[in-house]
Image: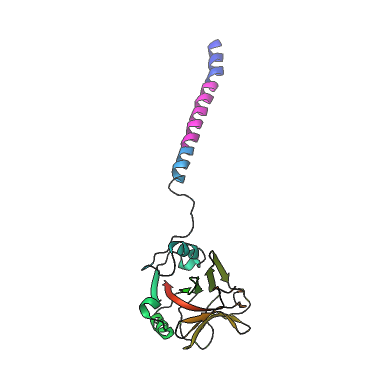
Amino acid sequence: MKGRRWRYTQLPTQVEDTLSGEEGEEEEEEEEEEEEEAVPAPAPQGPVEPQLTEASQVLGASEIRQLSLHLPPRVAGHPWSLVFCTSRDGFSLRRLYRQMEGHSGPVLLVLRDQDGQMFGAFSSSAIRLSKGFYGTGETFLFSFSPQLKVFKWTGNNSFFVKGDLDSLMMGSGSGQFGLWLDGDLYHGGSYPCATFNNEVLARQEQFRIEELEAWVLS
C-alpha cells in the first residue's frame, strides 16, 4: 500500500512537472516561431517610392517622396514617365497637348517660377483640349513654400481642368483660377478658388515659368 501511495502521490507531480516543462518549451517555441515570423514582415513605412523614367529638373528626391504620399492609391507604384518638359520640348501649350495624345493616365504637372518656387497640380486624367471642365475629385493643387501644402477638392464645384489653345486652367470660382498657364507656357497666375480653397501657389499672383514638366503616372 505504501508503494501504491508513493506512486499515487509522486506520479501526478512528475506528470505535472513534465507537462509544465513541455508546455513551457512549447510556449517558448511558439514565441520563438512568432518572433521568427515577425522579423521578415515589418510594419509598412508608406508607399513605394516612385520610379522616374528620367531625372526631374524641377523636383528633388525629397519633394518626390512628399508628393507620392498624396497621390491616389490607384497610381501607387506606377512609374512616372516624362511626357513633356519645356527644356526639351519648348514653351508651347499646343506642343504639350500633342505630347499628351495617346495617354489617358493621370498627370502630375510641376513648375518652377522665376523666384525658384515649386508648385503645380495633379490631374486625374491626361491634359487635353476641351470645351468645358473635366476631371474628378482626385485632382488637387500643391505648393512647396517651402514645406509641401496640398489643396484638395472642396466639393463646392467641379471646375477641375479646362484647356484651350490660349490657356490651361485648373480650379475656378468667382472668375478666378487656382492655376492658369498661357498659350506660350511662359506666364501664369494663381488665385484662391472655390474648387480647392487654395492659397496663391507662387509667391506672387502672376509669375513667369522657368521650367515646366508633365509626368504621366501609368
Q: Is residue 14 magenta?
A: yes
Residue 87: image quadrant is bottom left
Stretch of the chain drawn in magenta: 12-29
Identify whether 76 is placed above or below 172. above
Q: The N terminus is located in which quarter?
A: top right
Regarding residue 163, the answer to whether it shows in the image is no
Instruction: Answer with left or right where residue 196 lies relative to residue 34.
Output: right
Camera-nearest residue between 6 and 180:
180
Residue 194: image quadrant is bottom right
Q: Residue furthest front?
A: 115
Instruction: Answer with left or right where residue 213 lies relative to residue 195.
Output: left
Magenta portion: prevailing SS class: helix
Residue at horizontal 44 percent and vertical 45 percent from the top: 39
> What is the x, y in percent for residue 105?
44, 75
Residue at horizontal 47 percent and vertical 42 percent from the top: 34
Identify whether 12 is placed above or below 189. above
> What is the x, y in percent for residue 9?
56, 17
